[in-house]
Image (cartoon, rainbow, N blue to C red):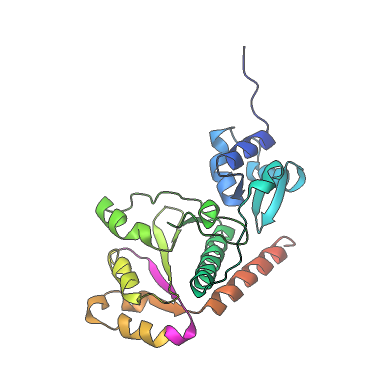
Amino acid sequence: MKTKPLTFSDAIEQVLLNNWYYAPLKLIYKEFSKYRKKTGKTPDNTIQERVQRDKKFTKIGHWVYALTEYLNKLPKEKEAKTEIEKKERIHSRIQGMLIEIWNMNWYDTYTPDVNWIFWNKQIWNLTTIKKIPSFTYEKIINDSIKFVDVIWFNERWFPAQLIEVENSTDFRAGFIKMNEIQDFLAKFLFIAPEKRRTKFETEKNKTAFKNIKDRCLFQTYEFVENWYNNQIESKKFKNFS
């Protein structure tokens, strides 16, 4: 007996079930074809229409959708009481924003952190890549690159930007990771409180990092927050263009 193909909504549901009940729209587009062939002239538009209109799905973030039936199973942020917990909350919030910024621009994202929460969503489940593509030697990826806080990939799955969020740890470890792929045309971004800029500059200007120093940039938490909010606003206006 011939099996009836899944509907668009059914295929989206399978994507969400296999990503802990929620996913960014970018990931839904990527994974959809595992469960149903994309048909029609604009299948991605159809997918977007389904997640927005079918009551089976609920929007839980900017272009992030969950299965309505499983909303009670989504992670919840706990109150940050200790200084360590507060720093971790800031770290995870910035990582979450950085991941969503790149997702909003329809590129792929990666983080090694599987447990941290960003507005009641695990940041791991917001990424579109769970394992770093083999763009270079496995030893370099496994010993260094896979531990970078956030990686933005381009359309060819090469790293476009490697990002480290530095609350209080030494910048040196981050520079060592970045230095490993100096032969690739990637940019390196460090996010930290403004008061740590001098420490960043000192580390960047060490001889060991002379080959990448011009590609290493420093930005603050406030910069990322403004960037994130501006991205959301710009996407709203784009809907009317």
Q: Is residue 103 left or right of residue 66?
A: left
Q: Which residue lies at the image location 32% right of the left edge and 78% below the top edge?
A: 213
> Which image quadrant for residue 223?
bottom right
Is 40 one of the magenta-colored residues?
no
Q: Quadrant of the C terminus?
A: bottom right
Is 189 one of the magenta-colored residues?
yes
Q: Quadrant of the N terminus?
A: top right
Q: Is residue 219 left or right of residue 54?
A: left
Task: Farthest residue to the front: give it.
Answer: 82
Q: Which residue lies at the image location 55% right of the left edge and 44% below the top edge?
A: 19
Q: Is residue 18 above or below residue 147?
A: above
Of 150 and 71, nearer the camera is 71
Task: Farthest residue to the top: give it.
Answer: 1
Q: Which residue lies at the image location 63% right of the left edge and 45% below the top edge?
A: 44
Q: Position of residue 83 (x, y in %)?
A: 51, 75
Q: Is residue 241 above or below residue 24?
A: below
Task: Farthest residue to the left: give it.
Answer: 207
Q: Position of residue 39 (x, y in %)?
A: 63, 34
Of 119 and 144, nearer the camera is 119
Q: Position of residue 198 (x, y in %)?
A: 39, 88
Q: Is residue 190 above or below residue 108?
A: below
> Which image quadrant for residue 126?
bottom right
Segment tinted magenta in the rendering: 184-196
Q: Position of residue 10 (x, y in %)?
A: 66, 34
How many numbered marks are there? 0
